Image (tube, rainbow, N blue to C red):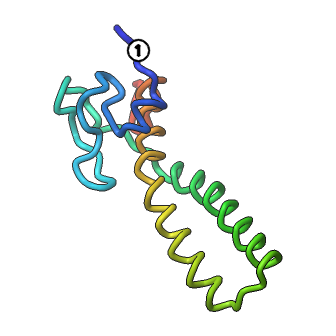
């Protein structure tokens, strides 16, 4: 079996098995099966993993950006909020889907599953 890179498949939001079919049917809703190869995604669940990574990464970018702008330019508070709240919100939405896809692809690549029962 040809093993695809789960990070690349995750960034492209593609099936980690074949690399062709879409992993999502909506913005964050995972398809039950791959439309290309028929791989089962019903047990794939990323849980809160993507949110933790995004909280750390986007939070660090936002805090550093706000502090830099504050100490360098001293803008009023309303301008800081006007700049950084939408920026952080858009950045969070932009990276949420790929992060979720990467974690699902890694889960499938490594054969891990929250729902797996080995009885």
Q: Residues within 10 Å of mark 1 (few under 14, many from 20)?
A: few
Rendered residue at 29%/52% (across/down)? 29
Q: Which quarter shows the C terminus?
A: top left
Residue 15, quarter of picture: top left
Rendered residue at 71%/68% (across/down)? 63
Rendered residue at 25%/27% (across/down)? 20
The percent position of residue 109, horizontal first and vertical second, equals: 44, 24
Rendered residue at 74%/74% (across/down)? 69
Q: Is residue 3 above or below residue 67?
A: above
Residue 114, quarter of picture: top left
The percent position of residue 7, horizontal first and vertical second, equals: 48, 31
The percent position of residue 6, horizontal first and vertical second, equals: 45, 28
Q: Is residue 24 above or below residue 84?
A: above
Side of 46 relative to 73 (left or right):
left
Farthest residue, direction front: 73
Side of 87 relative to 80 (left or right):
left
Q: Which residue is mark 1?
A: 3
Farthest residue, direction top: 1
Is disc 1 placed on a helix, strand or loop? loop
Q: Is residue 71 above or below residue 60?
A: below
Side of 32 relative to 7 (left or right):
left
The percent position of residue 28, horizontal first and vertical second, equals: 33, 54
Q: Which quarter shows the N terminus?
A: top left
Give 2 or 8, whichever is nearer the viewer. Answer: 8
Q: How many numbered marks are there?
A: 1
Give 44 or 92, whichever is nearer the viewer. Answer: 92
């Amino acid at each position: 079996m040809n093993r695809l890179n789960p990070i690349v498949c995750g960034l492209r939001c593609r099936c980690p098995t074949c690399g062709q079919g879409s992993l999502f049917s909506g913005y964050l809703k995972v398809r039950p099966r791959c439309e290309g190869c028929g791989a089962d995604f019903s047990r794939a669940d990323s849980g809160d993993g993507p949110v933790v990574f995004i909280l750390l990464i986007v939070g660090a970018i936002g805090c550093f950006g706000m502090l830099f702008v504050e100490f360098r330019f001293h803008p009023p508070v309303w301008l800081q909020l006007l700049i950084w709240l939408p920026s952080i919100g858009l950045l969070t939405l932009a990276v949420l889907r790929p992060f979720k896809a990467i974690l699902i692809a890694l889960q499938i690549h490594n054969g891990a599953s929250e729902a797996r029962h080995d009885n």
